[in-house]
Amino acid sequence: MANEQKVKKIYVCDTDFSEREVRGYKLDGQWILILKFQGSYHAMDASCAHSGYPLFKGTIDEKGVLTCPLHYAQFNCQTGAIVSEPPICPNQDLFDIAVEDNKIYWLK
Ligand code: FES
């Protein structure tokens, strides 16, 4: 197929996170944020959609709200949707990952 794009599968880390833990990794020239919430792993752009602060320095509360520590933008940690009121920035971009044999891969 002419439009078929090759997906790169990049090893990120092992699945040894605590519940609601957030980490950042620089891979392939880009920062990726990995988090664990309710037993599932999610990945998103590590630069806050508001002003680019490292979002992996934020925290996730028990409802799954990820808060950036710089200006307190809040995102749904599973969808990346901005949940701050008022919404001070766009949604956070999500990245595709695969979890296999206790390892997390970025499908870039
Ligand atoms: S950079 Fe994250 S809230 Fe401003």
Image: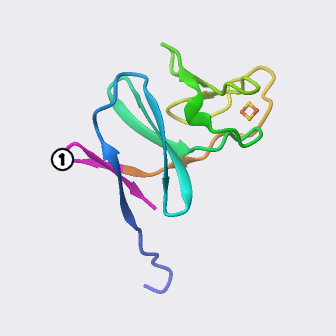
Residue projecting furthest to the left: 101
| Magenta stretch: includes residue 10 | no
Which residue lies under the disc numbered 1?
A: 101
Q: What type is the residue that disc 1 sits on? A: Asp
Predominant secondary structure, magenta span: strand
Q: Position of residue 97 (x, y in %)?
A: 39, 50
18 vs 102: above or below: above
Query: Image quadrant of ligand 1?
Result: top right
Q: What's the magenta region?
A: 98-108
87 relative to 15 in the view: left or right: right
Which residue lies at the image location 72% right of the left edge and 23% below the top edge?
Answer: 72
Q: Residues within 10 Å of mark 1 (few under 14, many from 20)?
A: few
Which residue lies at the image location 56% right of the left edge and 57% below the top edge?
Answer: 30
Q: Position of residue 100 (x, y in %)?
A: 23, 49
Given residues 46 and 1, the one toward you in this image is: 46
Residue 82, picture quadrant: top right
The quarter of the picture where the N terminus appears is bottom left
